Image (cartoon, rainbow, N blue to C red):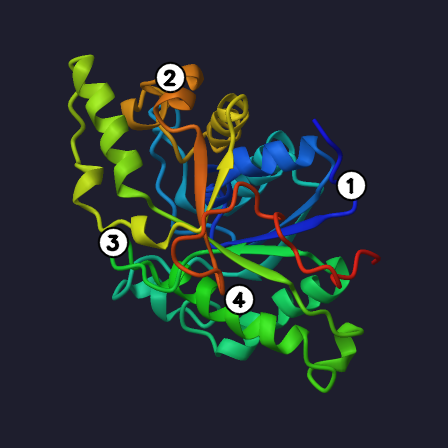
Amino acid sequence: MGSKSQWRLLSVHAHPDDEASKGAATVARYAEEGVRCVLVTATGGEEGSFLNPAYPAQQPERMARLRRAELDRAAELAGYAKVVRLGFRDSGMAGSPSAHHPLAFGSIPLLVAARGIVATIRRERPHVVISYPEHQEGYPHPDHLRVFEATRLALKLAADPAALPEFGPPWRVPRWAWSLWVRERMQRVVEALRARGVELDWDPTERDGHDELVRARVDVRGYHARALAALQAHATQVDPTSPWWFGLAPEELATLWPTEDYHIVGIPAGTVLRDLFEGMPADVEMDR
């Protein structure tokens, strides 16, 4: 594949494992093509559950330590060159006691949440930043909502010479992409599983999709296996027998839906790029 060694990408995620379940194949592809890929993870995932039957006797207080090691391994498998931890606490779901913890990412002041992202943007000078979308009605986790809000503010502040000068010279990110939940893709996976006689205990197609927001489809054929390996590295968080995650082989997934899909802020409806770096403005700065 052609080299993209001058390009840089930054992904912002809420918890360890989010980077493996959203866009890991994209990162694997770009990393192999030479893009420097950096991951920001906002929280330690303290409110995660032991979903793998191999961990029946684990203590909840061990969760953050286990998930830190899992994140390091998953990021390596996906192809991230660096992991930046913002150090906030997993909020848990809205209304839970953990949501009121003083370091809970979903409820801290927005500027506090954004500062670490600003610092990372100015240090790494990415050409593409990936976050979650603005509307997340299908899964309104406080930390996921805050990732969108904090990233939006960070992009503005990072470009402002007067804002947070302690983090270095300003950097205007040319492209902001949102990782999408595409309902049509979920429908194809569900139908393929049903053809095998597998019924899920939940219906992904009932969740609101972002199909109408797609502005880029990144071909990730050949990278599904890397993405699944990164997900399996989060051993506490995934059941290795889960049909949803592992019921179809990487080759089947590549046939069913060969792309990972994104919204790109500012790209008009009807335009669908084949690459997150396609059509960058000619005056984009390349140096760091």
SS label for mark 2: helix
Between discs 3 and 1, the one toward the N terminus: 1
For label 1, the residue is: 5
Q: Is residue 32 above or below residue 96?
A: above
SS label for mark 4: helix
Q: Mark 3 or 1, which is nearer the eye?
A: 1
Q: CA distance from mark 2 to mark 3?
A: 26 Å
Between discs 1 and 2, the one toward the N terminus: 1
Between discs 2 and 4, the one toward the N terminus: 4
Between discs 2 and 3, the one toward the N terminus: 3
Q: CA distance from mark 3 to mark 1?
A: 36 Å
**Residue 274, percent from left and from top:** 53, 41
Residue at screen point 41% across, 61% down = 143
**Residue 234, percent from left and from top:** 48, 33
Q: Residue furthest front?
A: 270
Q: Residue furthest right?
A: 287
**Residue 162, percent from left and from top:** 72, 87
Q: Quadrant of residue 243?
A: top left
Q: Amino acid at mark 2?
A: Glu
Residue at screen point 47% across, 55% down = 14
Q: Amino acid at mark 3?
A: Gly
- Asked whether disc 1 touches disc 2, contact meaning CB atoms under 8 Å apart, the reply is no
For label 2, the residue is: 252
For label 3, the residue is: 138
Local packing at callout 1 (Cα closer than 10 Å; few below 14, some 14-19, many 20+) is few
For label 4, the residue is: 151
